[in-house]
Image (cartoon, rainbow, N blue to C red):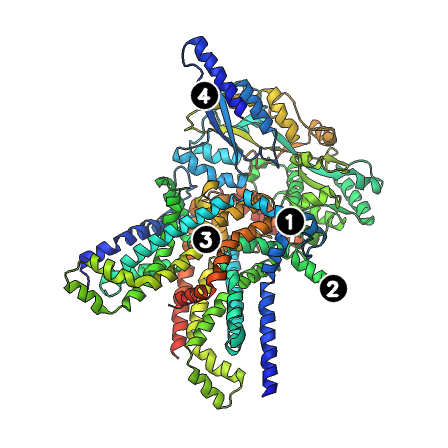
Amino acid sequence: MKTQLKLSTALSVVAILSSGAVYAQQATLDVTAWKGNEAEPAGLPELIEKFEAEHPEIDVELSYIGRLDTDTVIPPRLQAGDPPDVMMTDMPLVKIWGDAGLLADLGTDSEWFARIPDGLKASISSDDAAFIMPLEVIGMGNFVNMGLLGQVGIEEPPTTIEELKATCGALADADINPLIFTGGFSAPLFLIANGIEGSDVPASALGSGDSTFVDSASFNSGIDLIRELREARCFDPDQQAGLDPWSTALNEFSGGNFAMMPQGAWNIASFNEVEGLDYVFAPIPSSKESGVALDLFGIGWSIAERSENKDAAKVFVDWFAQPENLQIMLDAESAYSPFDDGASGTPDLAAAYDQSRIDGGVINYPFAVLDWPKALESEIWDSLTGFLLDTSKSNSDVLERWDWAVEDSL
Amino acid sequence: MTSYRSMILFTLPAMIVLGMFFVYPIFLTFQMSLTNFTGVGEAENIGLKNYDRIISRSRYPDALWVTVKFTVVVVLIQTLLGLAFAAMLHRLPAVRNFARAALFTPAMMSFVVVGYVWQFIYSPFSGGLNAMLRGAGLDWMAKGWLGDPDTALYAIAFAHIWMFTGYTTAIFLAGYANISSDIDEAGRLDGASSWQRFRHLEVPLLAPSFTINIMLSTIGTLKTFELPFIMTRGGPDGATRTLSLEIIEQLFGQYRFGFASALSIIMLVIVIAVAVFQNWYLRRREDV
Amino acid sequence: MPALNIRQLLLNVLVVALVVAMLLPLFYMITMSFRTATEIAEAPLGLPDRLAWENYAQAFGGMNYVRAVINSVGITISVTVLTALLGSMAAFPLARNTSGFARIFILLVALGLATPNFVTITPIYVIFRDLGLLDTYLGIILAFTALNLPLAVFFYVGFIGAIPKDLVEAAKLDNCSDWQAFWYVVRPLLGPATATLSLFVMLMVWNDFTYPLLLLTDKDKFTVTISVYRFVGNQNIQPDMLFPAAVLGSLPLLILFAIFQRRIVAGVTAGAVK
């Protein structure tokens, strides 16, 4: 940092001397993000260093603010006129802050916007304004411990329901816990992927109340499917109740106590550090041969409307859209590029997931592209936690609550 | 007697603070409860829709029911436990001061600390409670106490009771100190047993202590938020989602300021109604 | 009566055993704080193999402990002074007045005593935001003052009501103004009431979670309680961080309690009874 400062001072002195005018004014960008700390670096420390070296006239100060804290910490700053210049955002945040006029329009005429695939373009812009520059798309799929599957003679990760049931049975016979299936996250991924895949109506119709979950054949059969998985001895509900999807569940999987776990690819980096863990990242098993690749359009940069360093902020944001820079983040996150260049940072062990994307099994996680309201997410987690503990509950007991959550947020 | 003018002047600073941060906010809460305000931007008037949602969705009556269950369990057990300790300590002057101070110690800690410590005690894998049960050969009783909807609320209630039993005991002991020793002596001379004296002399004479204890713990637990927030975040499946926790959840999880305000108004009505009823009932009982 | 003495002795032992059982979680918290995460995972109930002071070093730095203690102390003192001053001032005329204004004021105060802070948290957040009070010491001090003021007024009304009327009347005859009567005659007598009140204020400010959670976001302004919450919460509940943070978070009040336990218990109980 210090040498950096010295270097940039030296450079601006040179600039002043050579042009004879105050030309390179130093700007300090206040950037907030819920990545970039030690647990989830996402390549940010390295990227910022690179950026400052290439743009000596701009200093970047990154502060880490957790995603949950972002909800309470940032809005007062945005409104009180003391906003960060650049903020990490996702679509639920962009919806609220953008609509309230707190974010700067990054322009749909920018170079990078043209490179976004059409499907995503519609989702991330509103009224011809783009409030977010997307950074990555991350896969959510099925982590499979191949070492454990090998012990029961299975060589391929399951991608269909039938394969999944057969795998569960074989594992259970050998006294290996087959599947982490917490109501808090893993089970919903499975149900959402299968429900949307088989649905007659687009996901957005369900999220806008135009059609209901209660009447959706695919979501009803998705819940039946969970009962079938239980029959097939894929999971023990009481055991799941003790697992926290964000901490203990991850440890249990990486410790080799469970064979499979639906989760996000951002875990790959830390799983790779576990010695002797032989695993792959596969799609979520579904009725389709390829399984479902559930893509999460995760994060991006936004600029505050009241930022005093808008020009520098734009330089910073545009810089991340350069493929050679973005690649550093994609590699750190095991993510896909949100642009149409097909770049990705996924390692070989995610080949099965990659293949499913190629075979057309991609579904966008509906909350990330605002097809479904955010309030529905926690309702799904809650309702499935309750359902897993008592699978005698009827399908409509569960799905009715989803429809209410949708209706309440309209 | 002070003049009217100086009464206004003396109370003015307090009035300003109370007005700005108590009266005006209550008024604002009511106003916001009729809108779909999201905390930023414009609020749209939507009439009684928020209230209609609250009564027509099982989620919110459920949260109220959780709150009531929690309050009843805590108030009942804490009062009885405090009374039992006080009655014993009243008869055992040798250990009274030590025990009173020791029992009071947890009340000096914050909900955050108590919540985290008990969360770990209850945790399924390396938590203290399960380890103790296994050590005692009671393996079948070991479980994820906070992960099971049947036990989560009671597990939290237990932590709350642990925290405040010393407080209740101290108030009952203060009540005992006000009972004239003549009365106790008279009971003894009449040949009343320790239990008879407790039941027929002490309990009626402790009526004011009952009033204070029950009112304090009821008001304290009706608004419970901290322990469930830290220990379970309201889970599993809403089994520990109290009304206060729901308000915070709506406010900062979902930016539904208007809806959270409607919940707040309902909470205000309930708390005031309970406080007024309890005050009336318990005071009447004191006079008998 | 030797039989009775043995019974008495057994009862004493029984009660002490029960009290010690109630203290087990505290003992657990302290023991665990000196053990490493591996030790706890392998033997959840054991004693520390050696005192793992590095746990404390980590928590001490991670919590920004010294700063947090200074913040808590500063906020507590400010709130106590403000609450005591505003509360006793308001109570002075109200204590012996039965006019409509006084009645309404007392009723309002009673309402304030019963109202949970959740009812007003939403608008307070909005008001604070509009006034630029979010994330400021002044804001959190005002919020706590407003929360404690009803209690203070109640306290002082009862206390001032018990001061002999003649004292104030005599001062008036000596041509004292109302303010002089309050400041030089009544205020010096309020010591005991203020001591009890500050006990309540200290406990509430030190341990309150809701207000600093929502109103303070700058980690340099965190109180001890909120720094425990943020420190433990950001680390996914690791026992080797949780327990030392819990001990550090409770330590100042526990030390105070160890020294003044009699006066604290008596004060808090008397305050509640009044």
Callout 4: SS: loop
Please give the residue where the numbered disc 3 appears in the rendered image.
Answer: C206
Instruction: Report the side of B196 relative to A327 (left or right).
Output: left
Residue that mark 4 sits on: A26
**Of helix, strand and loop, which one carries label 3?**
helix
Q: Quadrant of the N terminus of chain B?
A: bottom left
Label located before the other in sequence (3 or 1): 1
In the rendered structure, the residue with mark 3 lies on which chain?
C
At label 2, which amino acid type do we have? Gly
**Marks 3/4: CA distance?**
43 Å
Residue at (48% x, 66% y) in the render: B167
In the rendered image, residues at marks 1 and 4 fall on the same chain: no
Amino acid type of the residue that numbered disc 1 sits on in the rendered structure: Ala
Specify the quadrant of the image occupied by residue A246.
top right
Query: Disc 2 and disc 4: Cα gap in Å?
Result: 69 Å
Determine the chain carrying the residue at label 1. C
Q: In x, y percent, where is residue A183?
A: 64, 47
